[in-house]
């Protein structure tokens, strides 16, 4: 496995990682009233999902080619089950864990959309500025 040098998308990725973590912490606190539980959920759930993703990916590769939608559906189901299981283990409430596991990805999806639009708009003047200056416009 070769590692590539980080490209220009790394600042954007790291910025959204911070937003994602902030959303997970905020929602975790909102649902539980505890910063400790919120922090544990925001850190443990992605770690468990990362390990599960690695194992599921290896299992999927060993079983041979299959349609991508099947693999994506399996990853989605695995992610949801793990999110609920981790939330349940931390809070003791299946209802609370299920709500958090459903709401957090929805909020992150909306945040990602808004963040992506903001990032592109913020980069647009910087990308277009040199061309405008060389054309004689200010």
Image (cartoon, rainbow, N blue to C red):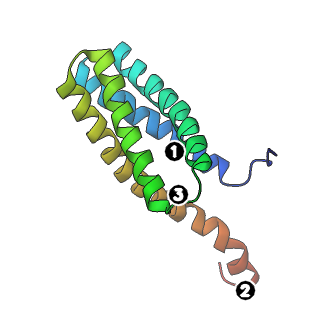
* Residue displayed at 41% across by 20% down: 39
Q: Position of residue 59 (x, y in %)?
A: 56, 42
Q: Report how far apart the C-alphas of labels 3 and 1 lie in the structure.
A: 10 Å
Q: Measured along the vertical axis of the image, is residue 129 above or below residue 104?
A: below
Instruction: Please tell me which of labels 3 and 1 falls first in the chain.
Output: 1
Disc sitting over residue 16 in the figure? 1
Q: Nearer the viewer, mark 3 or mark 2?
A: 3
Helix, strand or loop at mark 2? loop
* Residue placed under numbered mark 3 in the picture: 119
Q: Position of residue 58 (x, y in %)?
A: 61, 42
Q: Report how far apart the C-alphas of labels 3 and 2 lie in the structure.
A: 25 Å
* Residue displayed at 31% across by 47% down: 106
Task: Using residue 126 as the reference point, say whether residue 49 is left or right of it.
Answer: left
Q: Is residue 7 visible in this depiction of the protein? A: yes
Helix, strand or loop at mark 3? helix
Q: Nearer the viewer, mark 3 or mark 1?
A: 1
The C terminus, quarter of image: bottom right
Of 115 and 136, which appears nearest the observer? 115
Q: Nearer the viewer, mark 2 or mark 1?
A: 1
* Residue placed under numbered mark 2 in the picture: 135
In the orientation shown, which residue stands out farthest toward the left? 95
Q: Are marks 3 and 2 in contact (CB under 8 Å)?
A: no
The N terminus, quarter of image: top right
Q: Is residue 34 visible in this depiction of the protein? A: no
Disc sitting over residue 30 in the figure? none
Task: Using residue 43 as the reference point, say whether residue 63 is left or right of it.
Answer: right
Task: Using residue 99 as the reference point, say whether residue 41 is left or right of it.
Answer: right
């Amino acid at each position: 496995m070769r590692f590539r040098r980080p490209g220009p998308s790394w600042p954007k990725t790291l910025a959204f990682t911070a937003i994602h973590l902030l959303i997970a912490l905020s929602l975790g606190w909102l649902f539980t009233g505890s910063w400790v539980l919120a922090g544990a959920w925001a850190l443990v759930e992605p770690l468990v999902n990362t390990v599960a993703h690695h194992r599921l990916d290896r299992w999927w590769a060993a079983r041979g080619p299959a349609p991508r939608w099947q693999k994506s559906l399996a990853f989605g189901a695995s992610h949801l089950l793990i999110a609920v299981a981790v939330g349940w283990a931390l809070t003791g409430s299946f209802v609370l864990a299920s709500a958090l596991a459903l709401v957090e990805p929805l909020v992150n999806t909306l945040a990602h959309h808004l963040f992506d639009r903001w990032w592109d708009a913020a980069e647009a003047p910087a990308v277009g500025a040199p061309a405008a200056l060389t054309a004689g416009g200010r």
